Image (cartoon, helix red, strand yellow):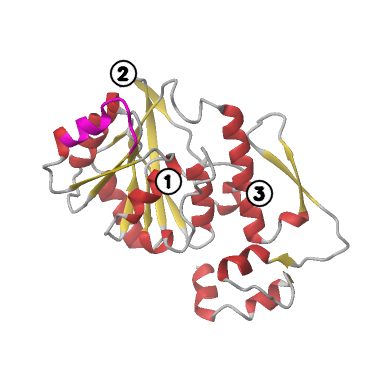
């Protein structure tokens, strides 16, 4: 958990973690330079709890705090919890059963919306089945979310150049290196109030969402094949139009080559069959099942 000036609801959020039916965990809290008494409250109430690790740092934003929290984890799996929300008692137990049973890199459940004072509103938006292609249209990896440290380490983590849409950007990257699963069980209470990051600075939220999609398309090597424009009915979404380039179906691999430290490739544009020759058969087989 990362928190910045979240004193009002923080106690309920932390207590919901400590009350989980699955108790073999370490709870990392990163205070991202709070100025409202959050730090004092955390230390006063939880510093003596052996399962709670408290980290304080200068304010660096949600991405920097999230990276600090995850990189401090020593376990195999990581569960995310926003500092104003509540994890229902069986959440970790149920998510872990799926992650281990299906050998997937991440699993997520469903949530209920609640008001600022905790009154129930109703079920949150939920797209029924995990779909990597659908994820390129917008965020559909709902709260609560669990992922493997193994796969976090195969990405660049949370992008510290983004001020919001950071979870969306991260799960786009995670979807490129591992499989996911949607457990259609409500395990999370998602608090609605005027300070929700998805409701404030909507212009920045839209722009960062668009940037996350563009970066994902660049990593996939297909950005040059698509014309992107803002969807007029939903400004947070992008409309994608295939560019006719005379039957050239090569992928632009510059993002992958850069990530792997390949500075002088024969060509940045590669046919898929050329790339297949570079991938071990066991990895191809895993992606097909």
Q: Residue at x 57, y 77 (%)?
A: 279
**Image position of 187 with respect to 76: above or below:** above
Residue 214 is tagged as 3
Side of 146 where 267 appears, left or right: right
Query: Residues under labels 2 and 3: Cα distance?
Result: 38 Å
Side of 244 where 228 appears, left or right: left
**Image position of 72 with respect to 209: above or below:** below
Q: What residue did someone put label 1 on?
A: 64
Whether residue 169 is in magenta: the answer is: no
| Label whose residue precedes the other's in the sequence (2 or 3) | 2
Q: In the rendering, at what x and y percent does residue 230 appear? A: 72, 36
Total marks placed:
3
- Judging from the image, what secondary structure is the residue with disc 3 in? helix
Name of the residue lying farthest toward the right: 246
Q: How crowded is the residue under tag 3: few (<14 C-alpha within 10 Å), some, or many (20+)?
A: some
Q: In the rendering, at what x and y percent does residue 142 appear? A: 44, 41
Q: What residue did someone put label 2 on?
A: 117
């Amino acid at each position: 958990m990362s928190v910045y000036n979240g004193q009002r609801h923080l106690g309920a959020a932390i207590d919901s973690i400590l009350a989980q039916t699955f108790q073999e965990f370490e709870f990392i809290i990163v205070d991202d330079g709070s100025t409202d008494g959050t730090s004092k409250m955390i230390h006063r109430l939880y510093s003596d709890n052996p399962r709670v690790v408290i980290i304080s740092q200068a304010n660096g934003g949600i991405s920097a705090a999230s990276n600090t929290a995850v990189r401090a984890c020593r376990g195999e799996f990581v569960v995310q919890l926003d500092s104003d929300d509540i994890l229902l008692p069986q959440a970790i137990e149920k998510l872990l059963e799926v992650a281990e049973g299906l050998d997937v890199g991440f699993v997520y459940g469903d949530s209920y919306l609640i008001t600022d004072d905790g009154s129930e509103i109703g079920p949150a938006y939920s797209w029924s089945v995990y779909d990597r292609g659908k994820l390129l249209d917008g965020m559909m990896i709902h709260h609560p979310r669990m992922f493997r440290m193994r796969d976090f380490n195969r990405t660049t983590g949370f992008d510290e150049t983004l001020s919001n849409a950071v979870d969306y950007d991260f799960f786009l990257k995670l979807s490129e290196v591992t499989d996911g699963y949607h457990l259609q069980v409500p395990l999370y209470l998602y608090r609605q109030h005027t300070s929700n990051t998805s409701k404030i600075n909507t212009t920045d939220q839209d722009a960062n969402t668009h940037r996350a999609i563009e970066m994902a398309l660049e990593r996939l090597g297909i950005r040059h094949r698509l014309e992107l424009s803002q969807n007029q009915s939903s400004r947070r979404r992008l409309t994608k139009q295939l560019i006719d380039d005379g039957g050239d179906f090569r992928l632009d691999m510059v993002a992958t080559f850069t990530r792997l430290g390949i500075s002088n490739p024969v060509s940045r544009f590669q046919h898929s069959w050329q790339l297949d020759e570079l991938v071990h058969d066991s990895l191809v087989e895993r992606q097909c099942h």
